[in-house]
Amino acid sequence: MPDATSATLPRPILSVCIYCGSSDAVDQRYKDEARQLGGILAAHQLRLVYGGGGVGLMGEAARGAYEAGGKVLGIMPQFLRTKERLLDEVETVIVESMHERKMKMFEESDAFVVLPGGVGTLEEVIELLSWRRLDLHKKPIIFLNSGGFWQPFFDLVDFTVGKKFTPDAFRHTYKSVDTVDEVLDAIAEMASHDEEIDTRRVL
Ligand code: AMP
């Protein structure tokens, strides 16, 4: 868990973490967008931080970044090296566990972009959002809502808000964009809004 005392320090955006699916069987649209995002990060001298694999959208984004001359940092648990096909072309840190991977991804990044993915992606973003709810960080979180991919998730969050399990203000702790071209502006906008959001108060 991040250190609560350092949670409010303003930081420049130098590294952007992506959470995304590892499946290769998905619609080409999602892969193309992942690759495009990698290229955009590289073009803006932003380092891409990700899970370290060569599979699915993860591999596409990493290749998109390094082929465009960008910096990439992969963070891979030892036991997944083969399964997630570690990319030799990029700098990779090998860790022991999934917990260590997520913590390192968090520490190395100033903002997060959530692309379409499965339960692994959901697990990662839920933890990030839950830390935000506890005020343990204020790093921008952007969902790439390709073709409405994340709408069922937003609906579930809204449902918990409606039932008063989650404060209404929580909805301001992340942004959704429809296209890859909007991602950097959304990060900048979130980074510039440092107002307190009382995400713990429900009523
Ligand atoms: P998926 O969206 O299921 O394809 O998973 C996307 C990525 O999340 C894969 O690289 C998984 O290894 C990773 N992942 C799944 N669960 C965890 C976890 N608990 N901590 C860190 N990474 C995870």
Image (cartoon, helix red, strand yellow):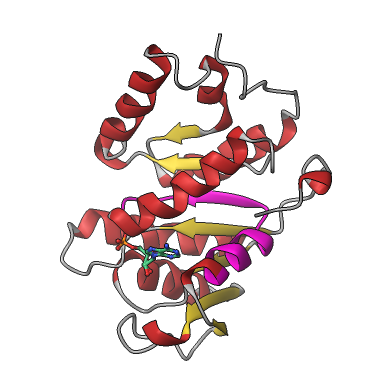
Whether residue 185 is visible, yes or no, is no
Q: Is residue 36 left or right of residue 10?
A: left
Q: Quadrant of ligand 1?
A: bottom left
On-image quarter of the C terminus: top right
Q: Nearer the viewer, residue 179 or 120?
A: 120
Find residue 79 and report its image quarter: bottom left
Nearest to the observer: residue 49 or residue 38: 49
Determine the residue positioned at 35% across, 55% down.
33
Q: In the image, residue 43 lies at what x, y percent?
A: 59, 62
Give the left or right position of residue 196, taking residue 34 as reference.
Answer: right
**From the viewer's perspective, is 124 left or right of 192?**
left
Image coords of residue 144 (percent x, y): 40, 43
Magenta-highlighted residues:
100-117
Judge whether 198 appears above or below 115 on screen: above
Q: Would residue 27 be seen by someone viewing this image from the given angle?
A: yes
Query: Where residue 28 appears, x then y in whole percent?
Result: 20, 60
Instruction: Look at 57% across and 74% down and name the residue there.
Output: 72
Magenta segment: does it hold 61? no
